Amino acid sequence: MSDTLKTISPVDGSVYVERNYATEAQISKALEDAKKAQIAWQQTSVADRAAICSRAIDGFIESKEGVAEELSWMMGRPISSAPGEIGGLEERARHMISVAESALGDISVPEKEGFTRFIRRVPLGVAFIVAPWNFPYLTSVNAIIPALMAGNAVILKHSAQTPLCAERYAEMFQKAGMPEGVFQYLHLTHADTERVIQAPEVDFVGFTGSVSGGNMVERAAAGRFIGVGLELGGKDPAYVRHDADLAHAIENLVDGGFFNSGQSCCGIERIYVHDSLYDGFVSGVADLVSQFNLGNPLEAETNLGPLVKTSAAQFVRGQIDEAVSQGAKALVDASTFAADAVGSPYLAPQVLVDVNHSMRVMSEESFGPVVGIMKVSSDEEAIQLMNDSEFGLTAAIWSSDVEAAISIGDRIETGTWFMNRCDYLDPALAWTGVKDSGRGCTLSTLGYEHLTRPKSFHLRTTL
């Protein structure tokens, strides 16, 4: 393997970033420095940690225009929507900073004469965060800010597709006054990533990525008895119930399925529509999707950029072609999208009907601009189909009946259940998944439980 990381831009196939991978000596020093720095950082007050983290987020906001252009070049998102990622980073970071004091406070127990007793949340130590490229700031901030606020040191390994994100974090934390060694990044090969997971200095691993990547993390961490958080994607379903607002459902679900060219772990990939609304819904979705402007993401009028690489686009093309050969009907004329080209990462969006769960496009994560739509006749049928998946990250319903939505949601195997919206992380709520979507939890006050351990204090005060 080359000792150089090269980021190939999906915009034009050029090398946009080139960096040396960390050497063995650099990795060892980073681990040693993190372990030492964490001891002092743990003794820093939550308020002081908050001040530093808040200043770092201020720096991101001031730099959002430059960050937006970098994102477009590195992973292909239209520059018109790229600044929204920094807005999401700010929302999540500010919330997790704001709840840290209460979430990390001592837990009291009933008074007992002659004793002082309480449970203290203490940091795990060194957190190794492995972040993906598709929402490189939105996914990584979920772990980085809470880990730091909890008193852990952080070593970040970002995707080879988005290495500048790791460097941006380091720049912002340095300017904010973060003590040396508390936050670091490493550009690592896959083999070195595994070795860092196995390093005795590492006390927690937070990974966002593919199921196969999650398997690697679990194997590498096996026998170490450390915390592991895994967010591994999904095949997220939506149900348009008979009492849904049709226009709202069409608009929301097109956005939820095609934003970021469908490259979202919680994007909508399969839709079940009550037969009373089916024809109108399908027609409206096909019409709206046909209006996307696929092209160079650096141009302001583009609202659908390329996939991250040609192989990803070819994978989705294969799913679509296979489904059509098995009887599915494609509703969008790809030839009307001039940028679409086989052998390139530019892929026209597609809507498929007459699909079923024997087709890969309805069971296998697509991670691209395609959705399959099926007709259902009842809530029971929708529930059965929504649960017929190896994944369980999010699921959504469009309905005007809150009680029905809650009742149906209780039966759906998912980490987050939405009503009349999708593809969004509320930082006040736990972000978690079931089945092959992973395990663990980030965001909300519960997210801090996975980045700390309980330590009991049992003090006899009367002899």
Image (tube, helix red, strand yellow):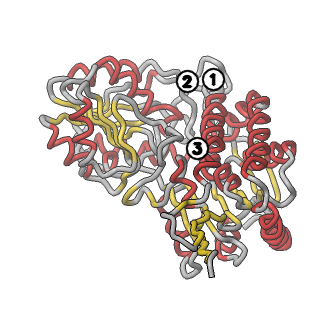
Question: Looking at the picture, how far across and down is residue 93, in whole percent?
Answer: 65, 41
Residue 394 appears left or right of 279? right
Q: Residues within 10 Å of mark 1 (few under 14, many from 20)?
A: some
Where does label 1 land, which residue? 80
Q: Which mark is residue 134?
A: 3
Q: Is residue 166 above or below residue 42?
A: above
Q: Which mark is residue 389?
A: none
Marked residue nearer the N-terminal end (2 or 3): 3
Q: Are marks 1 and 2 in contact (CB under 8 Å)?
A: yes
Marked residue nearer the N-terminal end (1 or 3): 1
Type of the residue with mark 2: Asn
Residue 303 appears left or right of 64? left
Type of the residue with mark 1: Ser
Q: Is residue 101 above or below residue 257?
A: below
Seen from the viewer's position, the closer of residues 83 and 416 is 416
Type of the residue with mark 3: Asn
Determine the CA span between mark 1 and mark 3.
16 Å
What residue is rendered at 81% in x and 42% in y?
A: 172
Where does label 2 land, which residue? 303
**Secondary element at tag 3:** loop
Quadrant that contains the N terminus? bottom right
Seen from the viewer's position, the closer of residues 201 and 3 is 201
